[in-house]
DNA sequence: TTTCGATTGACCAAAGGTGGACGAGGGTCT
DNA sequence: AGACCCTCGTCCACCTTTGGTCAATCGAAA
């Protein structure tokens, strides 16, 4: 399979606009004023960008977003840009959560959310996919999950309960979100020595969106995910964990609030599982099972931030 | 199933128009100006297109929609077009596939199938995704579905029943195939005037892979798909069909072999549905419901070829 | 006879390119 | 503190290229 060389100039400016989220005028201005990129030209003068050009533009955008001047950033090479962006991230990263998430007033998580919900109401698959895809270019993955997908699921749940939406709307949205999260997760290629995490839902728990979100989140944290879908009995969860030599098992529990069989399943899982394998449980109804979870020594997480923290702790056995 | 060779030229331009969603004038313009396809001619000068030509036109349409100029796209071969589109569609992913070092020879459906099954046995998500992705570039979509995915589902089903595989393997494979089919479907951007097809599974039918395959297949035939996932009661199917002004509803029935409630649901669906909306039913267990299907005037299809044929017939209201 | 398809040439909307100007925001100078 | 200036995203006017569509005409097919 002949791979296309990265430095082959072949993208017209329209494609670059879609992939970078920058406006065409701006791209040209950066080129004119700072020689930020220097695309080659077609015989008739059209700009042709290479993959490297696009990558560079994305980096430049991130650098500018992080507060650098474009005139300064444009002079740096790829590696310098990368370190610069990495430096900027951890500090203002969490602090920037409230105002961030927009690119010059264009794409805000709230606006995306509104469009998505409207698309769901109209049962418009194409529009919903389009909105999500477009947002994914502009928003970071964390924002995407925490500010768009999670609120969207909640809104849909609410609208469904109050009768505004039918099950078909909820089904359609689930299918689209599922695909989207699946792509999100598989876009992350874990390092080869990454610890394995089994993600699933216990038997009789059919709602898998929570598990998918967990999978996508853990993937961004550098875990290698084995996603098993919903509704799996404890024997199979344990077998899978052992076969893959997993470091941990993540379960999402959404419903019902109380089910003694589920508590039994959890105990059974713990008993069958290698004691070195940790269990993390989250989801809407996880709180109702606190006693059992404590009993079996599972990490119970109330939200994604806690989940991420738990993952970080699990990763480094020394710090337990 | 006697295969018709893909490169046999036999479709008049009208068929190509219906299958690709392109206007006849445009198809001819592409040929005239860019030699985008070069159909053979009948004795009297009529254009005759092969399946490969049609596939190529669909790919070209997608490339153009992704922002490529037709003049540029027309110069590429099938494989290049596929990579291009695949690259444009999903998240402008960070890392690209590693260079293919093995597989220097031909990619055959059988070899892919074997590697996939081995990956499932090893519960190796990454490898399975990699194999599918790689195969998708080399194989046509129809081959991919009929020679890889469908046999794979059957093999897994068999291995599961004979106890070689656990439910966790089956779950993992389902999740991956589901994502993959979802991407396959959404990679096909239907033309805007394409007729809508609702795809789902009746209530209590939880296996959705059949429905997903139907969705992906119909998408390649130029339908606009509203995929609703599994397990939907008739009221909601009907409501969705009416809200989107669908032309037809496709249902996949896999199990159980006999269920009187399902028969009732089918009757109810037919009663609630606008008589102009057709119902197509397929799946492993569809045969067991022949009487009901005949009673409600549903099209019952035994395999994907029949399904495609039924879709083609539905599309042209004149021929009903 | 009506419909479909082929051909040709023309038309025009959309996308892209260029150069220039504007103006909000943030300094600096005297 | 007011005048000045710099930075940089945006907008505009005007042009070229690209490419989808149409109309007119004619032969073939159903």
Image (spheres, coloured by chain):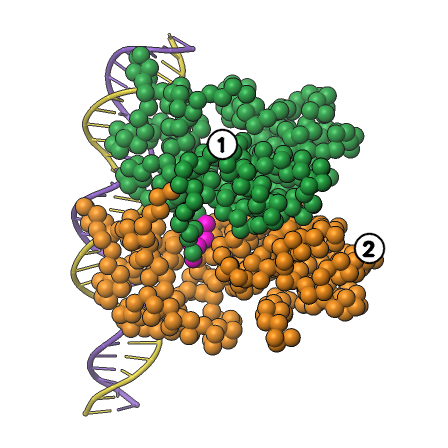
Chain colours: A orange, B green, C yellow, D purple
User: CA–CA distance between discs 2 and 1?
Assistant: 44 Å
Judging from the image, mark 1 belongs to the subunit labelled B
Queried whether the magenta region covers residue A135, the answer comes back as no
Query: Which residue was labeled with disc 2?
Result: A261
Residue B267 picture quarter: top right
**The residue positioned farthest toward the right in the image shown:** A260
Query: Which residue was labeled with disc 1?
Result: B143
Judging from the image, mark 2 belongs to the subunit labelled A
- Residue sitting nearer the eye, A104 or B181: B181
The residue lying at 44 percent from left, 22 percent from top is B5
Question: The residue tagged with tag 2: helix, strand or loop?
Answer: helix
- Residue sitting nearer the eye, A262 or B115: B115
The residue lying at 79 percent from left, 65 percent from top is A292
What's the magenta bit mostly, secondary-structure-wise?
Answer: loop
- Magenta region: which residues? B90-94
Image coordinates of residue A74 in percent, x first then y, are: 28, 68
The residue lying at 32 percent from left, 53 percent from top is A6
């Amino acid at each position: 399979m002949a791979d296309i060389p990265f430095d082959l100039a072949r993208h017209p400016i329209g494609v670059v606009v879609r992939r970078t989220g920058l406006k065409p005028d701006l791209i040209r201005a950066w080129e004119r004023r700072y020689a930020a990129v220097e695309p080659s030209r077609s015989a008739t003068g059209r700009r042709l960008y290479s993959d490297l050009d696009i990558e560079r533009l994305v980096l430049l955008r991130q650098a500018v977003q992080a507060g650098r001047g474009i005139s300064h950033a444009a002079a740096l090479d790829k590696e310098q840009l990368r370190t610069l962006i990495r430096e900027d991230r951890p500090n203002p990263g969490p602090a920037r959560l409230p105002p961030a998430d927009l690119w010059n007033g264009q794409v805000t998580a709230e606006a995306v959310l509104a469009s998505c919900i409207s698309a769901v109401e109209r049962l418009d698959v194409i529009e919903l996919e389009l909105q999500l895809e477009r947002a994914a270019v502009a928003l970071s993955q964390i924002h995407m999950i925490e500010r768009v997908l999670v609120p969207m699921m909640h809104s849909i749940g609410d609208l469904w309960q109050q009768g505004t939406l039918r099950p078909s709307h909820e089904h359609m949205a689930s299918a689209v979100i599922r695909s989207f999260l699946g792509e999100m997760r598989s876009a992350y290629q874990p390092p080869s020595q990454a610890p394995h995490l089994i993600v699933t839902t216990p038997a009789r728990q059919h709602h898998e969106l929570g598990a998918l979100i967990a999978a996508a989140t853990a993937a961004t944290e550098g875990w290698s995910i084995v996603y098993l879908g919903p509704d799996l009995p404890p024997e199979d969860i344990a077998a899978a964990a052992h076969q893959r030599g997993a470091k941990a098992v993540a379960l999402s529990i959404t419903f019902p609030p109380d089910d003694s069989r589920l508590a039994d399943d959890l105990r059974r899982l713990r008993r069958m599982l290698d004691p070195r394998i940790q269990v993390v449980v989250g989801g809407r109804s996880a709180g109702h099972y606190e006693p059992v979870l404590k009993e079996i020594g599972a990490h119970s997480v109330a939200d994604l931030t806690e989940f991420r923290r738990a993952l970080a702790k699990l990763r480094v056995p020394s710090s337990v």
